[in-house]
Each structure stands twice: as C-alpha cells, then as structure tokens.
C-alpha cells in the first residue's frame, strides 16, 4: 500500500489538513472486473454468468494480501467464471445491500442473483478456482434439473410474468421516461425489501393490464434503487417501495393509491383518460369500419339512429351529441363507438334483434365472444350511462350475436350533415312507419 502525505493550506484559514490517498488494489489491466453501483446490475445481476465478487477496502491488510491471488484466479477462470471486485469502502451502498460487515467478503452470484451465497473457501488462487468450479457444477446441475434462478426485476422468482414491467436504470431512465410522450408509473425498490416483494406480483399483473387497456400509452417501470443511485438520489428516494408518476414536461408526483393490482390499474387508467382525447364516433360506411373498431376494442357501442326524414339534421345531431358525451365519459375503457341510420344496415339490425323499429336503439358488442347487450332504457345521458355502467361491472343481460358471426355490412355514402330530401308525395307517415309496413308486408 502506498500512502502519500500532503499538506494543504487554505487561504484565510489558520491550520492545515492531512490527506491520505490509497492506491486501488485493481486496475483495468487486470482480469478482475471493477464493479460499482453504476454497472453492478448490468454486469452481475442481469448476467447469465456465474460471478465471484470480492467486497474489499483498499486500506485492509487482508484485502491487500488477497489481491494477487484474486488476480491469478481471475486470469485462470477467464471465459469460464466472472471474477469481480467492489471497493465497499467507497461504494458503501453495495456492501450494505449484501450484508457486508468485514473485509474481504466474497459472494457467489449464481442461479438466483438476488440471493448470493457466501464463499467459505481458502484465500489462495487454487482454492478460489476450486470453489468457483464447484459452484459452476452446482449451477449446471440445477439447470439440468429444470431449476432456474432469477436476475433483475424481470426474472425474480415467484408471482408470474414480469415481462411488461420495464427495467429502468441510470443509463436508460432519461431516454425511456423523461423523453417519452407516454405516462409512466415508476417503482423504486430494493431487492431485500419485504414490502417490495409483496408489491412485485401486483405491479407485474397491473403492468400487463395497463399495457393492453391503454395500448401502451401508460407504462409501468421499476428501478433497483440500491444499484441505480444516481436517478434514485435525483428524486429523493428514502424508503421502499416508492412509486412516482412521470408525465412529459411536468414535475413527477407521488403515487398515493393502493398497492393492489386493481388500485394500480384504476390509477393508470385515470392518468390515461386525463391525457387522452375522447374516442372517435364513426358512421358505419363499410365492413372495414365495423371490423376494425370492434376487433380492436373490448366492446363496440353501436347506435342505430332514426332515418334522417324522421328527425332532420338537428334531431340526429342531438343523438350524436349524447353519444359523444358518453364516449368522453367512458373513454378510459377504450371502447369503440359507431352509429348507422335505420334501414342502412339491415343485416346488422337483424343480428341484434332490433327488427326495423324502436329507434333510436343501442347495442354493445363483444366481437371476441360474439355476444351483445341491448339498451333497454331511454336513449339519454341517464339511460345510456346506466346501461354502460352495468356492462362495465359485468352485469346486464347478453345474447349471442345472430348467426354467431359479425353480420354483412353494406357500403353506404356518409351522411352530409343536412336534412333529408323527400321525393314523391308520401309525407303523411314517417320513414320508420314505412319501413315497418314493409316488414309486415314481407311477413304476410
């Protein structure tokens, strides 16, 4: 160990200080990988390799004695087992994370990187190599028997798939989160934290639900705050788990909701609806409009409005305004919204059992299950809200779509926004009444 003494005099201050500088035990020319909080997760935790990691202090006499043996072992095991070293005197957080109380401490990071084993062997290069090979054989045996450990948030054991939780780091946080147009819910966790482990399966399940229901516009991420301390310090993380909400161009806010899957999804959908435009209300002009809207949505809400001769432009616009108001109210459901004129899509009406009368009518179709439900109340804010509220909580009467398939759709011209023009001399009865008489004539 080299100790350099220097006397530092500060202008205007009577006195001086003694500065001690200790030469590092390892350099870039060694086969020992120098590990720090900024690279530990990437190099060790996310790696499929077996790692032996020494936690040391440069001033420790035993660490100085071990250093040449550690380097020899690293060279002998190069390409077989990874050998690393953490200056735990400088990087106390890493040492604290893995319960390091004395120096040197050697940990074996094998199948389950979040639960390393203690190395109990000798301190010669041969003993270290033997210990590494024994650990490697045990790892291979476990893999042959079907056991697999985890590394990183996305591979931790228990609780189902974490594939939709984005693992965030000091290196990717700004690009992934701060520069994104999406809304982010980010959990800052510690692997040893019991509350974090309880949250993990709920967070993972919520991530999948939120991704599907917002089409990826709200995302859930996770930061191992014990490793990625730059970003964690930036946001003043003091306890675990801490959840923050990030929206582009705004200061992050603390998540104050519950920790269940349902609570997390509801908050995410609220965030989505706060920032999302209402869904578009489309006229059914051809088969593609119906197919795309219904197949891309959990439910598609379809209104069959009276013929333009019955209502005129003002009456039709009144019905459309009611629909647009409801589309705004339920926009976080990501449902599709469609309308057509009575008589324009007779196959559709027949499949829904509307039967040529009772306009305006409304149905909600689940294209995946080929099921539908009909509005039984009034075509109004109150009636439609009650209808949709019942559907959203899984209640309400449903039936199978006629024929068990989506009906044939005819190509029609879009409504021009104007009143209808009557040709001929039949003005005493409405279009609906004419249509009904036509249906009765066919039936006779």
Image (cartoon, rainbow, N blue to C red):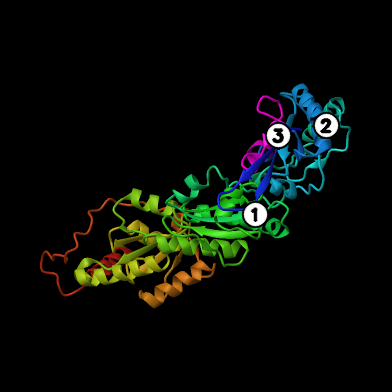
Q: Earlier in the sequence, mark 1 or mark 3?
A: 3
Residue 434: x and y, percent? 23, 68
At x 68% / y 29%, what residue is drawn?
A: 27
Residue span colored magenta? 26-44
Residue bearing the label numbered 2: 65
Marks 2 and 1 sit apart, C-alpha to C-alpha, by: 36 Å
Classify 49 as above or below 313: above
At x 71% / y 24%, what residue is drawn?
A: 79
Residue bearing the label numbered 1: 189
Marks 3 and 2 sit apart, C-alpha to C-alpha, by: 13 Å
Q: Residue furthest top?
A: 76
Q: Nearer the viewer, residue 103 or 236?
A: 103
Query: Which quarter of the figure is the C terminus placed in?
Result: bottom left
Residue 117: x and y, percent? 81, 41
Residue bearing the label numbered 3: 24
Tell me if residue 314 can be seen.
yes
10 Å crowding of disc 2: few (<14), some (14-19), many (20+): few
10 Å crowding of disc 1: few (<14), some (14-19), many (20+): many
Residue 225: x and y, percent? 63, 51
At x 49% / y 60%, what residue is drawn?
A: 252
Q: Quadrant of residue 363?
A: bottom left
- Tell me the element at label 3: loop
Q: Nearer the viewer, residue 323 or 183?
A: 183
- Tell me the element at label 1: strand
- Tell me the element at label 2: helix
Discs 3, 2 touching: Cβ within 8 Å? no
């Amino acid at each position: 160990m080299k100790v350099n003494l220097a006397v530092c005099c500060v202008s205007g201050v009577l006195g001086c200080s003694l500065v001690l500088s200790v030469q590092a035990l390892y350099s870039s020319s060694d086969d020992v990988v120098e590990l720090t909080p900024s690279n530990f997760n990437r190099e060790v935790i996310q790696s499929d390799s077996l790692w032996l990691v020494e936690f040391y202090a440069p001033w420790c006499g035993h660490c100085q004695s071990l250093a040449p043996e550690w380097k020899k072992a690293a060279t002998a095991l190069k390409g077989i087992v990874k050998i690393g070293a953490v200056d735990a005197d400088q990087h106390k957080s890493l040492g604290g994370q893995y319960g390091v109380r004395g120096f040197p401490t050697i940990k074996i990071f094998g199948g389950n990187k979040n639960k390393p084993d203690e190395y109990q062997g000798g301190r010669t290069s041969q003993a270290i190599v033997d210990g590494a090979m024994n650990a490697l054989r045990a790892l291979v045996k476990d893999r042959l028997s079907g056991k697999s450990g985890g590394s990183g948030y996305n591979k931790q054991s228990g609780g189902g798939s974490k594939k939709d939780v984005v693992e965030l780091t000091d290196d990717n946080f700004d690009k992934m989160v701060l520069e994104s147009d999406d809304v982010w819910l980010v959990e800052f966790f510690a692997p040893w934290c019991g509350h974090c482990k309880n949250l993990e399966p709920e967070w993972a399940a919520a991530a999948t639900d939120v991704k599907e229901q917002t089409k990826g516009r709200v995302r859930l991420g996770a930061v191992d705050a014990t490793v990625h301390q730059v970003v964690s310090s930036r946001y003043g993380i003091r306890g675990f788990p801490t959840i923050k909400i990030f929206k582009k161009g705004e200061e992050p806010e603390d998540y104050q909701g519950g920790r269940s899957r349902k609570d997390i999804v509801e908050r995410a959908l609220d965030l989505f609806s706060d920032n999302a435009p209402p869904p578009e209300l489309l006229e059914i002009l051809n088969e593609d409009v119906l197919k795309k809207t219904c197949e891309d949505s959990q439910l598609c809400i379809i209104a069959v409005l009276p013929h333009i001769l019955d209502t005129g432009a003002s009456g039709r616009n009144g019905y459309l305004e009611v629909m647009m108001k409801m589309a705004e109210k339920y926009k976080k459901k990501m449902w599709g919204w469609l309308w057509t004129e009575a008589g324009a899509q007779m196959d559709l009406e027949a499949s829904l059992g509307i039967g040529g009368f009772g306009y305006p009518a409304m149905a909600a179709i689940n294209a995946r299950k080929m099921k539908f439900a009909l509005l039984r109340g009034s075509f109004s804010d109150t009636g439609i809200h009650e209808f949709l509220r019942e559907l959203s909580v899984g209640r309400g009467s449903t039936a199978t779509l006629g024929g068990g398939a989506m009906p044939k759709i005819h190509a029609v011209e879009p409504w021009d926004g104007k009143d209808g023009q009557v040709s001929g001399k039949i003005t005493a009865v409405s279009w609906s009444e004419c249509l009904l008489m036509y249906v009765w004539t066919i039936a006779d």
